[in-house]
Image: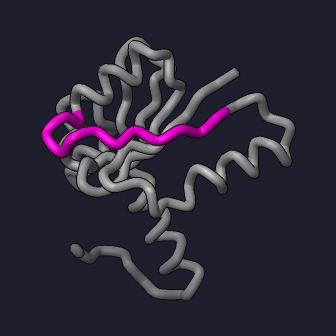
């Protein structure tokens, strides 16, 4: 069984756990989705603990998107925006990614809003 999770504080309001659990069940995927709610100064320690526990991946939410940068190897997008919202533990080192940028780009494209050449 694979275990994935959400790293944030607070997380009790999040719909991610029931959403992921429902998707795993509907798709017949042997996985669980758990929450991690460390103290606000312990994000990097939580990433290390998740890796030690064998967690397959984490979604990262407020307030830790910037705090985990030093605990992972960020990809180019995460490095450029200075925030990580997804951590993958499948490699030798945890890798940090930012999928928010692609999501915003898709939303603008879907609405035919041009975003080329601008800074936000």
Q: What stretch is highlighted in magenta?
A: 32-43
- Residue 80 visible from this viewpoint: no
* In front of the other: 72 or 9: 9
Seen as rendered, the residue at the extreme front is: 12
Seen as rendered, the residue at the extreme left is: 41
Relative height, residue 13 to residue 119 (above, below): above
Residue 70 picture location, percent across and down: 18, 32
Relative height, residue 111 to residue 30 (above, below): below
Residue 75 picture location, percent across and down: 33, 38
* In front of the other: 117 or 110: 110
* In front of the other: 40 or 105: 40
Quadrant of residue 112 in the image?
Answer: bottom right
Which residue is at a point 41% across and 60% down the rendered structure image?
100
Q: In this view, does 1 lie to the left or right of 26?
A: left
Which residue is at a point 32% across and 46% down the rendered structure image?
84
Relative height, residue 76 to residue 88 (above, below): below
Residue 120 picture location, percent across and down: 23, 75
Quadrant of residue 95 in the image?
Answer: top left
* Number of disc labels: 0
- Residue 109 visible from this viewpoint: yes
Residue 22 picture location, percent across and down: 75, 51
Relative height, residue 93 to residue 62 (above, below): above
Which residue is at a point 70% across and 21% down the rendered structure image?
1
């Amino acid at each position: 069984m694979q275990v994935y999770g959400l790293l944030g504080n607070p997380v009790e309001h999040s719909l991610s756990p029931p959403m992921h659990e429902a998707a795993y069940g509907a798709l017949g995927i042997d996985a669980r989705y758990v929450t991690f709610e460390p103290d606000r100064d312990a994000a990097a320690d939580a990433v290390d603990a998740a890796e030690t526990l064998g967690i397959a991946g984490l979604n990262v939410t407020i307030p830790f998107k910037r705090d985990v940068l030093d605990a992972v190897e960020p990809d180019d997008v995460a490095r450029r925006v200075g925030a990580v919202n997804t951590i993958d533990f499948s490699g030798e080192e945890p890798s940090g990614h930012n999928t928010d940028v692609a999501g915003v780009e898709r939303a603008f494209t879907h609405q035919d809003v041009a975003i080329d050449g601008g800074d936000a």
